[in-house]
């Protein structure tokens, strides 16, 4: 059950990060990355194991990768502009830093 909660927590965090990153461009991406770090770190602290943080982080990355590819209607949720690239690159590093943080 904890694995499922970690998976859904990572998916929810990824969706929130995608929706936040384009709002008020410099602030939205900063808030999205800070929220992602805190949420994934919280999951690890709540459940007491790093493996739950890995599950949440991998589901976060999967959601962001899906949001940055073309959908059936040729729409993109994470565009290839400065804000989108920052979310993809720096956000992934920050999520990996959340895994590396002590439980």
Image (spheres, grey):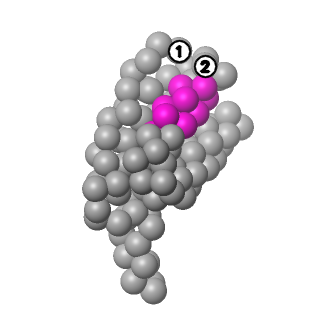
**Residue sitting at 44 percent across and 18 percent down?**
101
Task: Kindly identify which residue carries mark 2.
Answer: 45
Quadrant for the N terminus in the image: top right
Q: Which mark is residue 103?
A: 1
Q: In this view, does 100 lie above or below 62?
A: above
**Residue sitting at 35 percent across and 57 percent down?**
84
What kind of element bears circle 2? helix
- Residue 103 lies, in percent from the top left, at 53, 15
Is the C-beta separation of discs 1 and 2 under 8 Å? yes
Residue 18 visible (yes or no): no
Residue 44 visible (yes or no): yes
**Residue sitting at 31 percent across and 40 percent down?**
90
Gap between marks 1 and 2 measured at Cα: 5 Å
Q: Which mark is residue 23?
A: none
Q: How crowded is mark 1: few (under 14 residues within 10 Å), some or many (20 or more)?
A: some
Residue sitting farthest toward the bottom: 73
Is 63 in front, or is 75? 75
- Residue 85 lies, in percent from the top left, at 29, 54
Q: Is residue 70 above or below residue 28?
A: below
**Residue sitting at 48 percent across and 48 percent down?**
28
* Mark closest to the chain's N terminus, 1 or 2: 2
Q: Is residue 43 above or below residue 27?
A: above
Left or right side of 31 for 4: right
Q: Which contiguous range is marked in magenta?
A: 33-43
Residue 25 placement: quadrant: bottom left
Q: Is the magenta stretch mostly helix, strand or loop?
A: helix
């Amino acid at each position: 059950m904890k694995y499922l909660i970690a998976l859904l927590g990572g998916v929810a965090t990824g969706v929130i990060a995608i929706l936040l990153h384009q709002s008020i461009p410099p602030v939205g991406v900063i808030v999205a990355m800070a929220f992602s770090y805190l949420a994934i770190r919280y999951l690890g602290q709540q459940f007491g194991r790093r493996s739950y943080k890995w599950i949440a982080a991998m589901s976060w990355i999967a959601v962001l990768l899906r949001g940055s590819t073309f959908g059936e209607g040729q729409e993109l949720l994470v565009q290839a502009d400065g804000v989108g690239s920052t979310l993809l690159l720096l956000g992934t590093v920050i999520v990996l830093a959340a895994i590396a943080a002590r439980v």
